[in-house]
Amino acid sequence: MSRNYKYTIEIRFSSSTNNQIGDFNVEYPYANNSSLKDKIVIKEKLIKITAYRSKKNSVADIIHNANTATNHQISKSLAFYYASVGEANNITSIKITRHLSGKIQESETIFKSDVRQIATSDNGFYYLKKIHGIELETIFEESDKGRSLLYAITHLISSCSSPEPFQQFEALWKCFNSIYKLKENSTKDSDCLQSLRVHMLANVSNYPLSTTYVNSMTHDDIFSIVNWRNMILNDFKTESQSGYLCGFIRRISDARLIKKIEDSLPIRRDFLSNQGHLQNVLTHIQQMKNINSNSDIEVVAFMCLRYLYYARNKLIHAERVHPSFHWVREHSNEEMKISRCNIILILLIIDLLNFNTSF
């Protein structure tokens, strides 16, 4: 079937520079022939998509119907743009044109006042500059992996655009959830997080951004933003869970975390003693104190895979008043804590993105 209709989409931005970011021939959605490609050129000031189709679509349908193949290419291009540029540039106009036999049949331009901006504020776009551009190209793939990473990147960008710390956290967790399920090829959170921790400890060099960030954090820095007691009481509620608590403790060697475990042992000392685990825990604590060594990857794993998973469950399951339900303009203590946690999580996400092609 001949593709007689040519569609061009030009999205312009408020960037002060116009370096080229990417030039791609991209397979378009819903095509039975993978050799059929759309041309996408991305610069700091302009995204231009050129697509040939056999079907005549109205410009209005391309704009308003999120399920069209052309609309999907716009979403991919915008996600790639913001994740590559790392700037909260406004969209100044979007022009969509349909051509037939070299002549314009229909054209419409949406100007800035009618554009729903992707980037409404800048609350972390700087971190996106740390993503390796070559690793972002996966989002253009018409595959389950490509779609998962596209979804993840859109939530990552949404987080960077939100002024509210817990909204940032919710968007970051959705991004993280999509990536770790893709990496571990499973839909069960607990299995994915356990497998990811194993990978992190065995491949520390793959996680340079997150480990570098926590390297300078002291015991007090870490536990000024972590509600440790609440987490332990929640995750190990009953005496029958003492074996899991013992296992959790014995997997930790980092001196900063070990100090907290020792200081807070009275919280569950009786449980551990009654179930015969106390001596094993005490022996492990002493051995780790003798070694007295920091393990930055353990801190990243604890913060993101254990503590923030606990925080996510409390928030998503509505087991507390939403932390943003706060009537003072300044951020609350809880919001300030989660903001600092968000930095570690976004850096772990970017570490993962930066080797996603090896998943």
Image: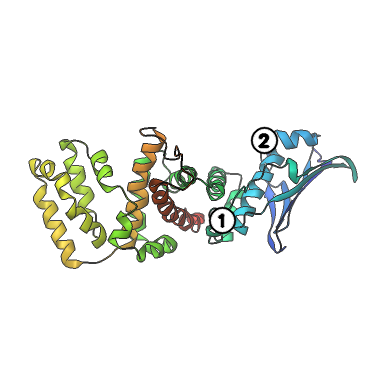
Q: Residues within 10 Å of mark 1 (few under 14, many from 20)?
A: many
Disc 1 target residue: 125
- Which quarter of the picture shows residue 310? top left
Query: In the image, residue 337 lies at what x, y percent?
Result: 39, 50
Instruction: Determine if residue 204 is in view.
Output: yes
Q: Residue type at mark 1?
A: Phe
Quick check: 198 left or right of 123?
left
Mark closer to the chain start, 1 or 2: 2
Camera-side mark, 1 or 2: 1
Quick check: 164 left or right of 46?
left
Front-lying residue, 1 or 190: 190
The residue sitting at 35% across, 33% down in the picture is 319
Query: In the image, residue 124 lies at what x, y percent?
Result: 53, 55
**Local SS, label 2:** loop
Quick check: 298 left or right of 57?
left
The N terminus lies in quadrant: top right
Disc 2 target residue: 66
- Which quarter of the picture shows residue 259? bottom left
Query: In the image, residue 357 lies at what x, y percent?
Result: 52, 55
Q: Residues within 10 Å of mark 2 (few under 14, many from 20)?
A: few
Instruction: Determine if residue 188 is in view.
Output: no
Front-lying residue, 109 or 340: 340
Q: Residue type at mark 2?
A: Ala
The residue sitting at 74% across, 37% down in the picture is 62
Query: In the image, residue 27 lies at what x, y percent?
Result: 67, 47
